[in-house]
Amino acid sequence: MAKSRKTTASKASKRKTSKSKTPKLKSAKRKISAPKKSAAQKSKVIPPSTAFDALPVVAFYYQFTSQDDHGFTWVSEHSAKMLGVKAHELVKETGGLRLHPDDVGAFDDFVLRTMAAGEPVDVHLRVLHKDSAPRWIHFNAWPQTKVKHTWSYTGLILNIDERKKAETEQSVMLQRMEEAQDIAKLGWYDFDVKSKMLDVTNEFADSLGLPFAPGGRVTGEAADNYINAFLNALHPDDRERYMSIIADESWRRIEFDYRILTRSNEVRHLCSRIQRTADKSGKRIRDFAVILDITERKRLEEDLRAQAGTDPLTGVPNRRSFEAAARREVERARRYAKPFAVIALDIDFFKKVNDTHGHDIGDIVLKEMTKVCLTQLRLTDVLARLGGEEFAALLPETDIIAATKLAERLRVAVANKQIATPRGLISITVSLGVAQYAPNENSIESAVKRADESLYEAKNSGRNRVVVAKLPSLVKPTTSNRVH
């Protein structure tokens, strides 16, 4: 008889399915049918009050005898709206929950196995509504009685579709944030001053080269140790400034850059953006900080500054950098009454080198001549290429006498250099003009102009020589502390 009823139910189900439209997303059409009426179940099922029909939940009775004999015995009317299946369709043999294909196994493996053990059921499932759209439900069932081999359950089905969508969106957002943190090397920490509770991200720990705290949270002494590790990682030149900023209780939001030293002694540039919470008296109670690793940005900025102020051929400063350095030296000379000098330098007959051997050989000559000059200068001196074959040297704390001696050494060193090129060895000479800056001059331009005039005088006098500009009348030669 049972076998006949199953066959009939199957045919009825197929007839019903053939009349309905094909859903966009096919379910496994899991049929949870009414159980067989055993002798122990001949008593009539008395439904609860119709008050359930007014609630936004699906209440139900469920009976489980075996994997092949289980199903709803009563369902509240809200099932049509929530599940897309009318209550009487869930109860009768040809009706059933339209489970999402991916959740059929979960129902068989978990729900039915749990009911077979007479234990409470608590599971999240997806059902296909009448429009075939998947919807999340929370399926709860509690065992009530057991008669022979049959368990009777009461249960509730809740609609958790919106909650699941929110959780999914939140999960996607968190994943994107993690990806953004990884790409941008972004970390953060949240510090509660009173409880000494510190929440940190893995990126924050990585930026310090510190081990990541389990769960990202440390408290009490562990938080103190973590903070001390961070303070110890601060670059020595930035530690005092950082401590001063943190100790200042007047601000509520701040952004500043600083450096740290990792365990491998690598210098990293960080930018902290801190939002501070204070009590009514203005006392700091919480800091939330976002930390961005800006090391690559800083390196790029330094490269760009270097490129903007460096001659690409010779690698020495260009005219712009020379003028900036000269302005700084003027201010320094005025403040400390220290002398400094300028040398103007030009390669003799350089146009002939280009015309005879080509510009590629001319470039080699410029680079080699630059190297020769740098060997004669101190680290504090500035050699710059102003354009073409024209160079200038800025000599801090150097008077006219010491500058003249240096210019002569430069002239001799260049004249004695045999420059190797693909066209053979080439010798060149240079002409130089020397001038000392006078404190009564308004700018560096006057000293540079006098050095240029002396340079052209050297060229007009036969080249390969040094000419010294006369000092302004208000300035007398001073004793230089230049190391030769």
Image (cartoon, grey):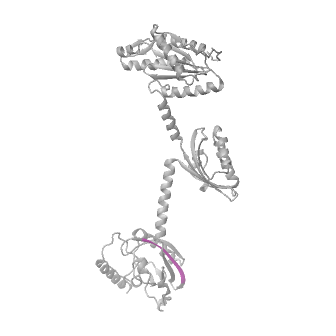
Q: In this view, does 208 lie above or below 462?
A: below
Residue 233 magenta-highlighted: no
Q: Residue 367 appears in which quarter of the rendering?
A: top left
| Residue 194 in picture, x, y percent from top left | 70, 57
Residue 136 lies in the magenta stretch: yes
* Residue 272 vs residue 149, the one in the foreground: 272
Query: Number of callouts in the render?
Result: 0
Q: Is residue 328 visible?
A: yes
Which of the image's four quarters has the C terminus? Answer: top right
In the visual, does 332 lie left or right of 415?
right
Point out residue 107 in the picture as x, y percentages from the top left corner: 45, 73
Q: Please provide percent x and percent y for residue 356.
A: 35, 14
Q: In which quarter of the image is the N terminus?
A: bottom left
Q: In this view, does 388 lie above or below 470?
A: below
Task: Please tell me whether residue 327 is drawn above or below residue 270 in the rendered image.
Answer: above
- Region of the chain picked out in magenta, as a range: 135-144
Mainly helix, strand or loop, the magenta region? strand
